[in-house]
Amino acid sequence: MKILYATSESAPFLRSGGLGDVAGALPKALVKEGVDIRVIMPFYSGIPVHFKQEAQFLGSCSVQLAWRKQYAGVYSILSEGVTYYFIDNEYYFARQDLYGHYEDGERFAFLAKAILQTMEVTGFYPDVLHCNDWQTALAPLFLDVFYKQKGKYSNIKSVLTIHNIQYQGSYDKYVIGDVFGVPESASDIVCYNGNANMLKAGIESANIVSTVSQTYAQEILTSFFAYGLEDILVQRAYKLKGIINGIDTEKYNPLKDKFIKINYSWRSPARKMQNKNDLQKSLGLEVTDKPLLGMVTRLTGHKGLDLVVRVLHDILDLGIQMVILGTGEAEYELALRKAMAERTDNRLRVKIAFSDEWASKIYAGADIFLMPSKSEPCGLAQLIALRYGTIPVVRRTGGLADTVQAFDPTQGIGNGFDFVTYNAHDMLDAIRRATDTYYNKDSWKNIMKNAMKGDYSWNKSAKLYKELYKSLI
């Protein structure tokens, strides 16, 4: 079984969020399942030098994109059993930021076409091309329109995974022909509500469309979650599948994490308190046994920051400490800094930064992890928090609903706390329930054990993806 996994980013080379984590972890898990899976992504200028020195040049080709003919060099690296292919084109990929450029549509249309064209350089013609999000969503369409008639491409099937449907690659419809090079006969596949929509093209063209949790697969059939694509998804619901993400349990491992004060496992929960004390000292907080609530998040309304800001002082008035790490929208950064300046009880710390080191310290040192997302396709932060024995408080949506089970003290089952309606005071009530449980040490010891003994690896999900591929071949 041969799979080509197409992505716009991947750990450990260059990542900006959850997609990069998934692309770095899922292929490794599939290799262990005996799958010949290879990853293809851009050869960004921001990839660390030591990786670029390791990369081997395989060759180059020309990629025809409408009236443009562009160079595509191909490099490869073998890492942990996975072959990574890198598409080199400085015009498109020599950028400081991965996304946010005025011609992103053209950049990633080129990537989608190059994914297919460079198979003639690598000699790797997969059974299944697995694309991810809008950045590679044109590849299934290009496969059908330009390549299926060529012998070695004729049997390739395609999968498109939607990691976050909010981002769709939507542009003025003139780009369909002039930039993407899609012929008039296929332009309706890309066009949606009067615009070009790259994600919609992938939904139409892929043989299977997957999402990153079972609940999210149902949610995106409704207008609240689908960001305008509900009609096409309802029409194509027969090919929609939900498979929950895992995390890289070697990378996110409290027994091995190099950033934390002392390593620990579910068998040594007392050691977690030493990480809490270290975090408190590092932040200039009082060293105390009171609950410490952490957040590692993008500071956006989508992540529930409007709820947090609305009742932030009420949360702190529960007598807890709180630390928030992240960057995002200016209004939330300003509001959080303002709240920290206003508090006189030294209980709140806000770090406007993106830091793996501080994230590890918070996962290991906090008691409670807050994740009140408006929607959350899967979520990785709650899985990492569970792995570290930091108990999540989440809104019951998407992957949060699939991975966090409300704690039942009478039966001793469950691994977190949740609330349903998108309401600040319902969130506050869930935090209050968590803090009340924290002071019952037997219950808290039980819920920590439940959390840390859970399997958050890719093992089960990798098997499900393997079966999904088999169903197509």
Image: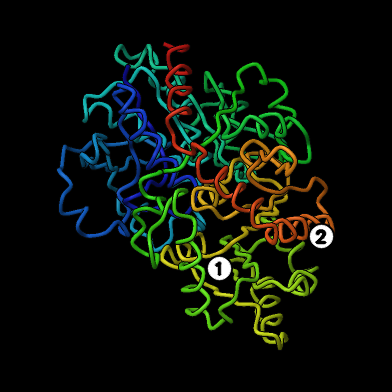
Quarter of image, res 6: top left
Residue 458 placement, left or right of 447:
left
Residue depicted at x 26% and y 59%: 48
SS under mark 1: strand
How many numbered markers are drawn?
2
Task: In this rendered view, identify the residue nearer to me: 111 or 289.
Answer: 289
Instruction: Bin the neighbour count of mark 1 within 10 Å (Cα to Cα): few under 14, some 14-19, many 20 and up.
Output: many
Residue depicted at x 47% and y 79%: 282
According to the picture, the residue beneath numbered tag 1 turns out to be: 325
Instruction: Bin the neighbour count of mark 2 within 10 Å (Cα to Cα): few under 14, some 14-19, many 20 and up.
Output: some
**Vertical side of 292 occupied by 376: above or below:** above
Question: Tag 2: residue type?
Answer: Ala
SS under mark 2: helix
Task: In this rendered view, identify the residue nearer to me: 60 or 354.
Answer: 354
Residue 469: x and y in percent read: 44, 18
Residue depicted at x 59% and y 76%: 288
Q: Identify the image quadrant of the C terminus.
A: top left
According to the picture, the residue beneath numbered tag 2 turns out to be: 424
Task: In this rendered view, identify the residue nearer to me: 253 or 329.
Answer: 253
